[in-house]
Amino acid sequence: MKKAVFRGSCGVFPNPRRAVLAVILLTAIICIPICVVGAAYAKADGQIISLSTTVADSEPALERSSEWQTVRMRVTAYCSCPKCCGEYSGGPTACGYKIRPGDAFVAADKKYSFGTEMLIAGYNNGEPVKVLDRGGAIRGDRLDVFFGSHEEALEWGVQYLDVKVHIGPQT
Ligand SMILES: [Zn+2]
């Protein structure tokens, strides 16, 4: 008698209903983490939007602040002379833009697409300028602001600034 009871409770799934429950439980344990990871990836697309919201919260003073993101950047300057541009001197910018006298624009990393507006303190009278160029040393959060003369570029030097980057739709 004793032996029979022992054998019964020793089976992994003593009855079919428990077996079904166990399979459901196992499926849930495996699936839930996959679903959570999947949802996290799906949310990654909306990351920029949530970032801009953060900026809006911390900087209510800036107009249309929800569309601008503040990025700390190392800002250097250049002109179209051979010293600054080497073989590209006098030619168009990396996006094919033909430089005209009095132009103000910036060279930026390729993560900032051409035409992206940036507002750099002390440059272009506080008006936003567009990304129209690239540079060999301009990688990551480095910027090169354009000046009409080499003297002005030298005068700018190297500045670490909080640059406002327009991340909203192009106007
Ligand atoms: Zn120059």
Image (spheres, rainbow, N blue to C red):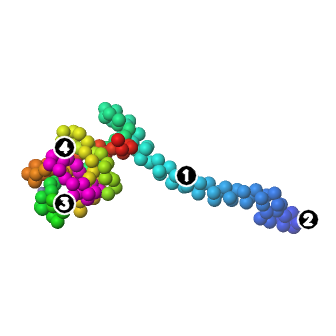
Q: Foreground: 79 or 73?
A: 79
Q: Nearer the viewer, residue 145 or 104?
A: 104
Question: Dot 2 corresponds to which residue?
Answer: 1
For label 1, the SS is helix
Mark 4 vs mark 3: which is more N-terminal? 3
Packing grade of label 4 (10 A; few <14, some 14-19, many >=20) is some
Q: CA distance from mark 2 to mark 3?
A: 98 Å
What secondary structure is the stretch in magenta mostly built from?
loop
Callout 1: 10 Å neighbours few (<14), some, many (20+)? few
Q: CA distance from mark 1 to mark 4?
A: 42 Å
- Residue ID at (17%, 66%): 87
| Residue 46 visible in the current orientation | yes
Callout 3 environment at 10 Å: few (<14), some (14 to 19), or many (20+)?
Answer: some
x and y percentages locating residue 5 in the rendered image: 86, 63
Q: Which residue is mark 1?
A: 39
- Residue placed under numbered mark 4 in the picture: 123
CA gap, disc 3 and disc 1: 47 Å
Which secondary structure lies at badge 2? loop
Marks 2/3 in contact by CB < 8 Å: the verdict is no
Q: What is the spatial separation of the Cα atoms under label 2 and label 1, in whole angstroms?
A: 54 Å
Q: Are marks 2 and 1 in contact (CB under 8 Å)?
A: no
